[in-house]
Image (tube, rainbow, N blue to C red):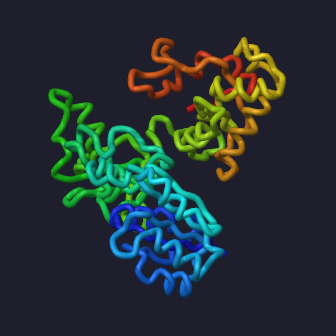
């Protein structure tokens, strides 16, 4: 059964953001959102919410009076109340009488979002967790997508029609489709005529029908929203013919506080593997609690117990992957990749071929000497 939530909030953007976010989380359902606490008694009696989110300062019937009414009509409801004030007397009133809940103090984002308005993001993927955080704070980051060759926008989310995890719908006049191999292609007045003085490169990028090949892999959902999954050149095709987009999987692994970096390999191999770089600070804290010396990171990472811990963490974050996407083996590295070392580009993208070459011997050992299939 879903946890039902009622929202009492006079800031329309924050109220809408919370409603959309919570309705999008499995196991939660917003039964109503209101600009103030007028009629709160009847609302909680009718909808019987498990949780109420409310602001202390609202016009008309404010949060303090609303709290009293809610406790009177449905005392078991859990209350989350936020305020930008430090008024101890008012906070005490909110807590008195055995209120079941807690208070968020100094939530100044309510005023900050009004000053900033909407924020656009492009040029690099936005972490879904970061997007959700700002959306919940009423400061939605509207993600878009395009390239220099597309002048530069192809698709963008707009306020009120935002779908987190996507770059929105194609802008008017621009066609976007997914090629049979998964590549995003586009056509429209925004697409370049060609690369100056480079006819061969132009012919490779723009086909005779005017479709520009972006080099990115993506998906168009049933509502026309575009989701980018990876770069075409990074796509892993296993020896069994399975296509794996590594970047989303690497990002999942990096969601663990114990993992600083992750690189997935496995092109033309029987199964994928993953190289993991630990977060030194988190790992050392864990190691200290388990009685391991932490002065030498290289030695620490070489310990079987530590390697097992990092592998468990990675598998935990990847538990929802399809069987063929799950890395079968892990290689734990103690030193992170760097621009100076050549493993990262100046924009901090991983140079997979260089990483693979640097660790070839250890990688081959994971595969047990099984050769890579010929292209």
Q: Residue placed at 51% from the left, 77% from the top?
A: 31
* Drawn side of residue 245 relative to residue 272, left or right: left
In front of the other: 103 or 142: 103
Q: In the displayed structure, does residue 114 sit left or right of residue 40? A: left
Residue at point 29%, 39% (across, down): 205
Relative vertical location of residue 1 with respect to residue 268 in this rendering, above or below: below
The residue lying at 47 percent from left, 62 percent from top is 21
Whether residue 314 is visible: yes
46 or 340, which is in the foreground?
Answer: 46
| Image quarter (top left, top right, bottom left or bottom right) of the C terminus | top right
Residue 55 placed where, x, y %?
44, 64
Residue displayed at 61% across by 32% down: 265
Position of residue 319 relative to residue 175, above or below, is above
Residue 218 visible somewhere in the drawing: no
Image location of residue 212, percent across then percent down: 28, 45
Q: Is residue 52 above or below residue 245?
A: below
Estimate the x, y position of residue 317 in percent, counting from the top left. 66, 45
Q: Is residue 245 left or right of residue 131?
A: right
Please identify the quarter of the rendering in which residue 372 is found: top right
Residue 180 on image: x %, y %: 44, 53
Position of the N terminus by quadrant = bottom right
- Count of residue discs: 0
């Amino acid at each position: 059964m879903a946890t039902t939530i009622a929202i009492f909030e006079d800031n329309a953007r924050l109220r809408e953001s919370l409603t959309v976010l919570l309705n999008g989380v499995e196991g939660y359902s917003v039964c109503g959102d209101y600009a103030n606490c007028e009629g709160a008694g009847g609302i909680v009696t009718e909808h019987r919410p498990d949780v109420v989110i409310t602001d202390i300062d609202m016009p008309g019937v404010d949060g303090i009076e609303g709290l009293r009414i809610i406790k009177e009509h449905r005392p078991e409801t859990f209350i989350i109340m936020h305020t930008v004030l430090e008024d101890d007397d008012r906070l005490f009133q909110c807590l008195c009488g055995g209120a079941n809940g807690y208070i968020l103090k100094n939530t100044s984002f309510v005023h900050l979002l009004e000053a900033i308005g909407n924020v656009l993001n492009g040029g690099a993927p936005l972490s879904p967790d970061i997007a959700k955080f700002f959306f919940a704070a009423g400061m939605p980051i509207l993600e878009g997508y395009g390239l220099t060759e597309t002048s530069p926008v192809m698709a963008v989310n707009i306020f009120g029609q935002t779908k987190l995890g996507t770059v929105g719908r194609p802008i008017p006049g621009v066609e976007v489709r997914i090629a049979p191999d998964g590549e995003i292609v586009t056509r429209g007045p925004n697409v370049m005529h060609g690369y100056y003085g480079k006819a061969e490169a132009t012919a490779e990028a723009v086909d005779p029908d005017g479709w520009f090949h972006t080099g990115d892999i993506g998906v168009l959902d049933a509502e026309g929203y575009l989701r980018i999954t990876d770069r075409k050149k990074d796509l892993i095709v296993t020896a069994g013919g399975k296509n794996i987009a590594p970047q989303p999987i690497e990002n999942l692994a990096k969601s663990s506080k114990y993992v600083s970096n992750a690189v997935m390999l496995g092109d033309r191999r029987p199964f994928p593997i993953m190289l993991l770089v630990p977060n030194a600070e988190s790992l050392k804290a864990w190691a200290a609690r388990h009685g391991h010396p932490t002065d030498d990171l290289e030695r620490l990472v070489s310990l079987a117990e530590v390697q097992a811990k990092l592998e468990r963490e990675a598998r935990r974050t990847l538990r929802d992957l399809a069987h063929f996407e799950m890395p079968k083996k892990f290689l734990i590295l103690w030193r992170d990749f760097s621009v100076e070392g050549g493993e990262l580009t100046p924009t901090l993208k991983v140079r997979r071929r260089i990483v693979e070459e640097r660790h070839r011997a250890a990688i081959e050992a994971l595969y047990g000497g099984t050769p890579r299939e010929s292209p």
